[in-house]
Amino acid sequence: MKRITVGLLGAVLASTSVFAQDFSQVNITTIPVTDNIYMLQGSGGNIGVSIGDDGTFIVDDQFAPLTGKIVEAIAALTDKPVDFVVNSHWHYDHSDGNENFGKAGAYIVAQDNSRHRMETDQVVSLNGREQEAYDASGLPKITFMDAMKFYFNGNTIEIVYTGPGHTDGDAQVYFRESNVLHTGDMFVRYGLPFIDQPNGGTTSGMIDSLWEIAGLIDDDTIIIPGHGQLAKRSDLLEYRSMLVTIRERLQAAIAQGQSADQVVASDVVEGFAAPGAGTERWVRAAYEEYK
């Protein structure tokens, strides 16, 4: 299997889309998680990296224009190639590098629904941005419906689908022996989560999934969230409690016959998010889910 090299990237990146963001200003930061698992942060979702005698296994690959910098960061950890890329889900900030890694020989892995999304043009509901279908090199070659396992670099790597939540194709990646979990955007470390309702995500699904995820791990588990800093099980449960509280407030308001405008005005997210256009958009989407 070929390793992605800086020389190869010139040809690979020439065909990638150019985003409004100036990726030349983005630096990739490497954060140790255990002795052979790392988190890379740049622009987009957090990348999990497992290195060892078997090779290199990563979770998510951010934006295509950053592939060169990501490869350089991984090369500082190991001289082994990237063998597998697991997509936590299909959104571009987690999977836009697929075509680059696929062309260089890595196998892309994802939940079935995520591959189906990548096969055709999609619109990400958060910002209305169109995500074009990936070519064959960027599509997952290995998919699963409910669960699958890898035995790689001394870990039993359990990849689990807990049902619709952030999208309809979210994968949880648990490195059992190292006790490290990558959640993708089912759990993030900023205010209200992005729930992509038009693309199969649901608030209740996320709440249920978070409870199932909490049962997979323990209090010592280190969590690599979709965005933000490393976390623990207690952080994930606190996040879930926030969503449960908001759901209870929202359902009570709907039961009282309140309109979407009234629910927005009543501030059902008080204590969790400041008023603003983004918060209002989130509440209105949740209202449509429960009305």
Image (cartoon, rainbow, N blue to C red):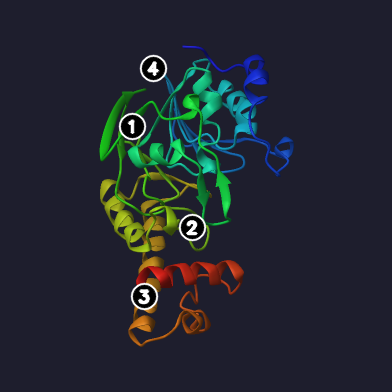
- Which badge, 2 or 4, comes first in the chain's sequence? 4
Residue designated by label 4: 54
Residue designated by label 1: 143
- Which badge, 1 or 4, comes first in the chain's sequence? 4
Image height of 274 relative to 240, above or below: below
Amino acid, disc 2: Phe
- Which badge, 3 or 1, comes first in the chain's sequence? 1
Look at 57% across and 43% down and name the residue there.
44
Residue designated by label 2: 194
Closer-to-camera residue (120/230): 120
Task: Report the mark closest to the observer, 3 or 1.
Answer: 3
Residue designated by label 3: 291
How far apart in space, not on screen, are marks 1 and 2 (Cα)? 24 Å
Amino acid, disc 3: Lys
- The x, y position of residue 84, in whole percent, is 42, 25
Task: Report the mark closest to the observer, 1 or 2.
Answer: 1
Amino acid, disc 1: Thr
- The x, y position of residue 241, in whole percent, is 37, 66
Amino acid, disc 4: Asp
Look at 30% across and 52% down and name the residue there.
214
Quadrant housing the C terminus: bottom left
- Which badge, 1 or 2, comes first in the chain's sequence? 1
Is 96 displayed left or right of 140 in the figure?
right
How far apart in space, not on screen, are marks 1 and 4 (Cα)? 21 Å
